[in-house]
Image (cartoon, rainbow, N blue to C red):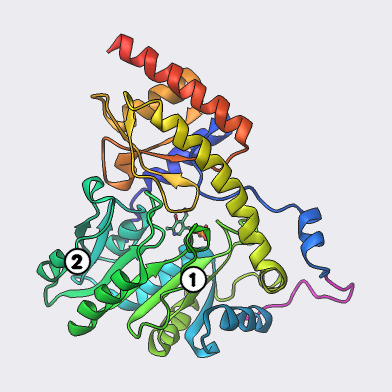
Amino acid sequence: MQAPRIDLFEWLLRNAPHATYNLAFSNIHGLTIQEYKTLTDFSFPDSFELGSNAQYGADELKKTLCSMYNCAASNLVTTTGATEANFLVFSSLLSKGDEFIIEQPGYQPMWLTPEMLGARRIPWPRTFERGFNVQIETLTHLITDKTKLIVLTNLHNPSGVLMNQKTLQEIAKIAADHGLYVLVDEIFLGGSFLPQPSSFGIPNVIVTSSATKIYGLGGLHSGWIIAPEEVARHCQRVKAHTTGAASYTSEIMTARILSAARVELIRRFQRRAKTNLEYLTKWMSHHTEFFEWVQPDGGIVCFPRYTMKISSVDLCKYLFETQKILINPGSFFNQDGFLRLSYGCDLPLLQSALDALETGLRNLRSNL
Ligand SMILES: Cc1ncc(COP(=O)(O)O)c(C=O)c1O
């Protein structure tokens, strides 16, 4: 099996250590141990064995997730991040020659992984002109007898746009009429400014998520799948071929903080996201010569369209080389002419980064 390169990751990992302004990552700043201890009185007892393992997931995490999603333990599989969660779903539902319909622009691994498994990508556009919303009426035309899965993110990565429950239900209904599942990666949903419940519960919807983005727990890397029982069972079987068991220690720490302080963690996220978005929104309104955008509904990423005639990779390389600003090229999300810009850093850093961005764009324009 050939593993296709994920340009987005290579770009990030190569350049992040050398960036002065990192506007590229999609996770909120990590929780410190001090913050952790303020939010929960949990600490491991001296007798806790670091050799502990739970192939079917730590009971505490399963209990927490069952109450978060109003699901049964048989609906869930704990994983190492949403990356493994998505991998298990793709491996369980797709075989060589199958087709999957996926939103575009989108998050690169969500088509490269199934393509690696031999499945064929059928793009479903979410256009800028439509505010990055899907066009429901076009879905049926994309479905063939080879289609097995529809793949979405909510909030949408890269635009941060929220898909409402009614639209999701309509998509799931069309999918159900054709015997298909819908995978909704909800890793950013807790960061929506307008709270929306998970779409787990719609019978043919599979949800994946993790504690890495909104909750500031990236280093623990706990993730999960919430799925109809038959899918969860299959994913659990595939997990025996990937990690076998996720980190038990991480699962316990994640369970304790989510059950004690999930709401506070979401507030922590949204405080920063809303303050920074307010600043960015003003900045965008003063820089329409360079950008037009769809304002995100939450999260800390957005996907503005730039006005200059240059490829997004060249533009990002130029900004990185001349200003040490790290931003992601839209082409890594399969849409050139756009940038994925993250605004989740400290506000003073964001302000300096946007000043540097303006300088870079002005210099570039005078050289083009
Ligand atoms: C939509 C989406 N899913 C999954 C992931 C990866 O999640 P994790 O870090 O939990 O493996 C990302 C990371 O950016 C993402 O944007």
**Residue at x 36% of width, y 48% of height:** 5
Say which label, 2 or 1, has the lower sequence index.
2
Q: Is residue 80 left or right of residue 40?
A: left
How many marks the image carries: the answer is: 2
Q: Is residue 22 above or below residue 115?
A: above
Please identify the quadrant where the N terminus is shown. Answer: bottom left
Which quarter of the figure has residue 2? bottom left
Residue corresponding to mark 1: 242
Q: Is residue 53 magenta?
A: yes
Which quarter of the figure has residue 117? bottom left
Q: Is residue 87 above or below residue 32?
A: below
Q: Is residue 31 magenta?
A: no
Q: Which mark is residue 169?
A: none
User: Which is nearer the eye, 327 or 270?
Assistant: 270
Residue 339 picture location, percent across and down? 36, 37
Q: What amino acid does circle 2 point to?
A: Ile
**Residue at x 28% of width, y 50% of height:** 131
User: Which is nearer the eye, 33 or 237?
Assistant: 33
Residue 95 picture location, percent across and down? 26, 74
Q: Secondary structure at mark 1?
A: loop
**Residue at x 40% of width, y 62% of height:** 154
**Residue at x 45% of width, y 24% of height:** 357
Q: Residues within 10 Å of mark 2 (few under 14, many from 20)?
A: few
Between marks 2 and 1 in the image, the one whose residue lies nearer the viewer? 2
Q: What amino acid does circle 1 point to?
A: Thr
Q: Is residue 250 above or below residue 67?
A: above
Residue 111 picture location, percent across and down? 30, 58
Q: Is residue 263 left or right of residue 298?
A: right
Question: What's the magenta region?
Answer: 43-54
Residue corresponding to mark 2: 136
